[in-house]
C-alpha cells in the first residue's frame, strides 16, 4: 500500500499528542479528575448511608485522586519552567 500524499502547508509527519504539552489541557483535565474524585467521595458517603458496599467507589475515587494529583503537578511544573 502506498502512503497518502501530505496535505499542502503541513509537514510530512502528523503531530500527534501535541495537545498533551499544553498547560491549559492539563489544567482542564486536572479539574475534571478533581471533580470526579470529589463525586466519588460523595458516592462513598451515600453508599455508607444506604448500606451498600463502598469498595468500588473507593477504588475509583483513589484512581481519580491519583490522576488529579499527577495532572496538577505536571501542569504546575510546566508553568514554572
Image (tube, rainbow, N blue to C red):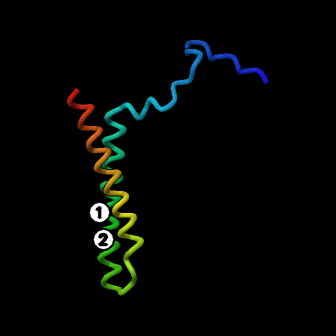
Residue extending furthest left? 80
| Residue at the image point whose x is 38% and y is 70% from the top | 57
State which quadrant residue 27 falls in.
Answer: top left
- Comparing 17 with 35, the one in front is 17
Q: Is residue 31 left or right of residue 6?
A: left
The spot of residue 37 in percent (x, y) is: 32, 60
- Comparing 37 with 74, the one in front is 74
Other residues around mark 2 within 10 Å, as few (<14) / some (14–19) / many (≥20)? some
Judged from the image, the secondary structure of the residue bearing numbered disc 2 is helix
- Comparing 14 with 58, the one in front is 58
Judged from the image, the secondary structure of the residue bearing numbered disc 1 is helix
| Residue at the image point whose x is 23% and y is 26% from the top | 81
**In this picture, is 52 found above or below 66?**
below
Residue occupied by mark 2 = 42
Q: CA distance from mark 2 to mark 1?
A: 6 Å
State which quadrant residue 11 falls in.
Answer: top right
The spot of residue 76 in percent (x, y) is: 23, 37
Q: How many marks?
A: 2
**In this picture, is 47 found above or below 32?**
below
**In this picture, is 64 found above or below 40?**
above
Q: Determine which of the numbered discs, if any, sits on residue 38 in the image.
A: 1
**In this picture, is 27 found above or below 22?**
below
The spot of residue 12 in percent (x, y) is: 59, 16
Contact between marks 2 and 1 (CB within 8 A): the answer is yes
Residue extending furthest top? 9
Q: Say which quadrant the N terminus sits in.
A: top right
Other residues around mark 1 within 10 Å, as few (<14) / some (14–19) / many (≥20)? some
Amino acid at each position: 500500500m502506498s502512503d497518502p500524499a501530505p496535505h499542502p502547508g503541513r509537514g510530512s509527519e502528523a503531530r500527534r499528542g501535541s495537545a498533551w504539552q499544553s498547560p491549559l489541557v492539563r489544567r482542564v483535565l486536572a479539574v475534571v479528575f478533581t471533580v470526579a474524585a470529589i463525586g466519588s467521595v460523595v458516592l462513598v458517603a451515600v453508599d455508607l448511608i444506604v448500606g451498600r458496599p463502598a469498595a468500588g467507589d473507593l477504588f475509583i475515587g483513589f484512581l481519580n485522586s491519583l490522576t488529579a494529583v499527577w495532572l496538577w503537578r505536571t501542569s504546575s511544573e510546566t508553568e514554572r519552567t
